[in-house]
């Protein structure tokens, strides 16, 4: 079936969703299409029972090319890995960072990013500088770029940030930040865990050096899948900087003698860095195939159409939440369209001091799930000037959601918050 012309109702039927539940937590894990589940099952069976060399298919020669194309890059720049965390660890520990080098990032990064940089700080004396991103409905992209710019020093080597932050759902001005990095000669590391499957984007045009993605969130592949983009050639119109020195850790392909070929300074690759990283022992062949199937389905539906649908549902959810809880309750940006994402974090209660009450915010989300089968989550994050972290309720929209579901969820959230206030 060609999905390009299918209605959103028909497309919703593709997904293995729990019956009578409202899934508003794709930021944690998406829902797999039945076809993706079937692929995982079929390929698991095909590769069980012996008499087969399981190593070559783990290089995913066909899948990587197709997936790369969907993101505007080439096979040598894409790795199918095991999740965004693993991808990020392989990038961070593959960078050539030494004592005194500075990494600039934010306090709103996932622990999968911060824990790796903290390890480098303790192990090698790398200096980690964190800025706290502004929160709230009225935040503007220029504020964010200026915040990073002010924190760059002559020792800064790396700029690392989430394409979309998980705590407040801020879509960072990715291209503007990559240009800032380029003007300062910095390597850019983007945590794109939430990007793949949501944004119809061209990785090369974003101008970053590394983008790590989760396969199981917006891309709706199996748990334990991820994508890693490694810039492997120089396209000056996107990023004129030389390729950063990079050590492909976890590789069974690294040469026994000598080093891999020198990396290119032009638009033609001289070393397949994707292969060095992809060759990493026995792989989960079935999960890789299932992720590739999810990507193929996305291409069939149309990634442009998917992005539009997700953002249309998000606009509806944001408007309904702002109407019900007030614009002042929003932690996610809303006024600047460049920063809006389908992850919406807000304070549900009347008393603003409850934003520091983890038990109450946690109970709110737990009751949504237990009493109403609405699946959201709570998040915690620094707020500039606040003596304590804030806690928020967060919902996410995806293509399998409907406007009616969102209306229902916001009504229930409003009533529950009134009960608990
Ligand atoms: C922004 C962000 N980065 C990284 C991760 C970790 O992703 P994974 O579970 O694929 O390792 C998450 C998970 O929620 C996330 O939201």
Image (cartoon, helix red, strand yellow):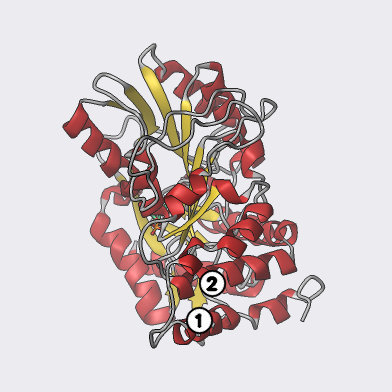
The residue carrying mark 2 is: 289
Instruction: Indicate which quadrant contains ligand 1.
Output: bottom left
Residue at the far left in the pictured view: 122
Q: Quadrant of the C terminus?
A: bottom left
* Tag shown at residue 43: 1
Where residue 216 sits in the image (x, y, percent)?
47, 65
| Image point (48%, 19%), residue name | 149
**Apparent side of residue 303 relative to residue 397 in the rendered image (left or right):** right
Near-viewer residue (405 or 307): 307
The answer to whether residue 328 is visible is yes
Q: How many marks?
A: 2
- 36 relative to 162 in the view: left or right: right
Residue 235 position by quadrant: top right
Q: Which mark is first along the chain, 1 or 2?
A: 1
User: Residue 372: percent from the left, percent from the top?
Assistant: 43, 79
Q: Secondary structure at mark 1?
A: helix
Ligand 1 neighbours mark 1 (CB distance < 8 Å): no
Q: Furthest-front residue in view?
A: 257
Task: Please tell me which residue is depicted at 53% across the width and 68% down the height of the picture.
Answer: 291
In the depicted structure, whether residue 113 falls above or below residue 385 = below
Q: Is mark 2 within 8 Å of ligand 1?
A: no
Q: Are marks 2 and 1 in contact (CB under 8 Å)?
A: yes
- Image coordinates for residue 133, horizontal then vertical, percent: 43, 34
């Amino acid at each position: 079936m060609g999905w390009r012309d299918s209605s959103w109702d028909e497309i919703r039927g593709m997904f293995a969703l729990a019956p009578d539940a409202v899934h508003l937590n794709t930021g944690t894990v998406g829902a797999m299409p039945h076809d993706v589940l079937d692929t995982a099952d079929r390929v698991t069976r095909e590769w069980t029972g012996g008499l087969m060399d399981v190593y070559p298919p783990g290089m995913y020669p066909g899948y990587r090319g197709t997936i790369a194309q969907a993101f505007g890059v080439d096979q040598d720049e894409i790795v199918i890995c095991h999740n965004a965390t693993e991808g990020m660890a392989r990038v961070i520990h593959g960078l050539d960072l030494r004592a005194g080098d500075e990494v600039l990032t934010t306090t709103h990064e996932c622990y999968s990013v911060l824990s790796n940089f903290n390890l480098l700080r303790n192990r090698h004396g790398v200096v980690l500088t964190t800025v706290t991103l502004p929160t709230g409905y009225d935040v503007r992209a220029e504020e964010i770029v200026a915040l990073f710019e002010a924190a760059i020093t002559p020792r800064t080597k790396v700029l690392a940030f989430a394409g979309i932050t998980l705590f407040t759902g801020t879509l960072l001005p990715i291209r503007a930040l990559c240009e800032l990095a380029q003007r300062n000669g910095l390597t850019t590391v983007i945590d794109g865990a939430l990007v793949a499957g949501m944004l119809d984007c061209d990785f090369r045009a974003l101008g970053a050096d590394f983008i790590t993605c989760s396969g199981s969130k917006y891309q709706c592949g199996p748990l334990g899948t991820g994508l890693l983009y490694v810039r492997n050639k120089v396209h000056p119109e996107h990023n004129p900087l030389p390729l950063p020195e990079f050590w492909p850790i976890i590789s069974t392909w690294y040469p026994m003698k000598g080093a891999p070929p020198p990396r290119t300074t032009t638009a033609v690759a001289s070393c397949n860095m994707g292969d060095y990283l992809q060759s990493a022992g026995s792989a989960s062949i079935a999960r890789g195939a299932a992720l590739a199937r999810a990507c193929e389905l996305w291409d069939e539906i149309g990634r442009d159409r998917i992005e539009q649908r997700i953002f249309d549902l998000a606009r509806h959810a944001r408007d309904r939440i702002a109407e019900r809880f007030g614009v002042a309750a929003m932690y996610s940006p809303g006024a600047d369209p460049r920063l809006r994402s389908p992850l919406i974090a807000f304070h549900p209660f009347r008393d603003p001091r409850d934003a520091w009450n983890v038990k109450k915010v946690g109970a709110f989300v737990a009751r949504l799930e237990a009493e109403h089968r609405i699946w959201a989550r709570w998040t915690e994050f620094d707020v500039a000037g606040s003596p304590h972290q804030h806690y928020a309720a967060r919902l996410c929209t995806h293509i399998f959601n409907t406007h009616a579901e969102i209306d229902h969820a916001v009504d229930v959230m409003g009533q529950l918050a009134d009960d608990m206030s």
